[in-house]
């Protein structure tokens, strides 16, 4: 899909754009920089210790490396944009509530990759056509890796589901973690999102993205012969 706004090729070209355009870019870039870093710190790096085999550990190391690299990419652009370091520091800027879940086990990590990285894929999908080309370029580099993370999660969930105990653990992790997912897409009728769409930085409304995600997440979970739980909150 073509962007709703003209293409802006480089950071230097922002001088010719309205201040709100730069502000919108900075919010998106800072949010990705914070959340990629925090996710790597609280989920991916600790998951290396939970991984049950050398093969699983190797793949989990690779995922942790890629998530830190996603942060490094967004942080590089944040620095170019002159975003203050505090705005991309998870100790200062609060990360998304999706990371509030306390990771305790390998099955939980597999479920997080299967579902949270699918949510991230939806976010990155909109970056692929975004009007600010440096951000579009990061989206294109990041997308294949996020797809790999989500496939990794699904594949290891499938493997766990081969035993009755594993199946119970995966279902319990889905039941617990799914509750964190709807908020990931932000509030319905969001002002930020309205400006992102106006400037061709996002394609979809938060509520459209959430609905699309919940359908896709349900489909993945049911393809494993598991149940997608009723959600306490539809996230607005
Ligand atoms: Fe990532
Ligand atoms: Fe990822």
Image (cartoon, rainbow, N blue to C red):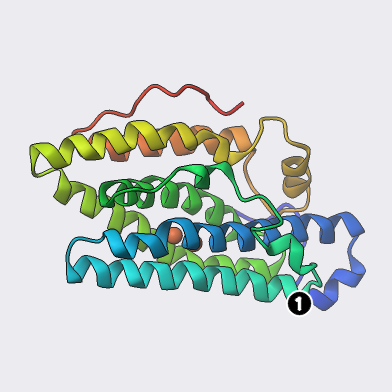
Give the answer, above or below, for where 166 lies relative to 113.
Answer: above
Towards the viewer: 144 or 68 = 68
Image coordinates for residue 96, horizontal then vertical, percent: 59, 46
Q: Give the residue at x 45% y 31%.
A: 179
Say whether residue 187 is left or right of residue 118.
right
Q: Give the residue at x 73% y 35%.
A: 190
Image coordinates for residue 64, horizontal then vertical, percent: 41, 68
Report the label total. 1
Q: Can the viewer see residue 129?
A: no
Q: Residues within 10 Å of mark 1 (few under 14, many from 20)?
A: few
Q: Quadrant of the C terminus?
A: top right
Image coordinates for residue 230, horizontal then vertical, percent: 39, 21
Say whether residue 15 is left or right of residue 80.
right
Secondary structure of the residue carrying numbered label 1: helix
Give the answer, above or below, for where 80 lies relative to 176.
Answer: below
Say whether residue 164 is left or right of residue 200.
left
Say whether residue 173 is left or right of residue 71.
left
Image coordinates for residue 26, horizontal then vertical, percent: 76, 61
- Residue marked by disc 1: 80
Q: Give the residue at x 71% y 57%.
A: 92
Quarter holding residue 164 = top left
- Asked whether mark 1 lies closer than 8 Å to ligand 1, one says no
Give the answer, above or below, for where 14 lies relative to 201.
Answer: below
Quarter holding residue 171 = top left
Towards the viewer: 91 or 164 = 91
Q: Give the residue at x 49% y 62%.
A: 41
Q: Can the viewer see residue 233?
A: yes
Of the four image quadrants, the one with ligand 2 is: bottom left
């Amino acid at each position: 899909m073509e962007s709703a706004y003209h293409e802006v090729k480089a950071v230097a070209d922002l001088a010719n754009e309205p201040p709100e355009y730069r502000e919108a870019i900075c919010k998106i870039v800072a949010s990705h920089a914070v959340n990629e870093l925090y996710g790597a710190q609280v989920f991916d790096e600790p998951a290396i210790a939970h991984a049950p085999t050398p093969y699983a550990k190797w793949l989990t190391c690779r995922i942790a490396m890629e998530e830190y690299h996603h942060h490094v990419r967004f942080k590089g652009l944040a620095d170019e944009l002159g975003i203050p370091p505090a705005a991309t520091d998870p100790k200062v800027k609060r990360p998304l509530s999706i990371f509030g879940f306390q990771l305790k086990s390998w099955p939980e990590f597999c479920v997080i990759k299967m579902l949270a990285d699918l949510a991230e894929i939806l976010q990155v999908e909109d970056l692929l056509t975004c009007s600010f080309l440096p951000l579009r370029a990061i989206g294109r580099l990041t997308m294949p890796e996020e797809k790999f993370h989500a496939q990794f999660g699904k594949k290891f969930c499938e493997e766990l589901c081969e035993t009755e105990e594993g199946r119970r653990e995966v279902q319990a992790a889905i039941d617990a973690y799914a509750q964190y997912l709807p908020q990931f897409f932000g509030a319905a009728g969001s002002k930020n999102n309205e400006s992102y769409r106006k400037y061709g930085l996002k394609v979809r409304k938060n509520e459209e993205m959430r609905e699309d995600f919940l359908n896709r997440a349900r489909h993945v979970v049911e393809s494993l012969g598991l149940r997608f739980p009723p959600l306490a909150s539809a996230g607005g």
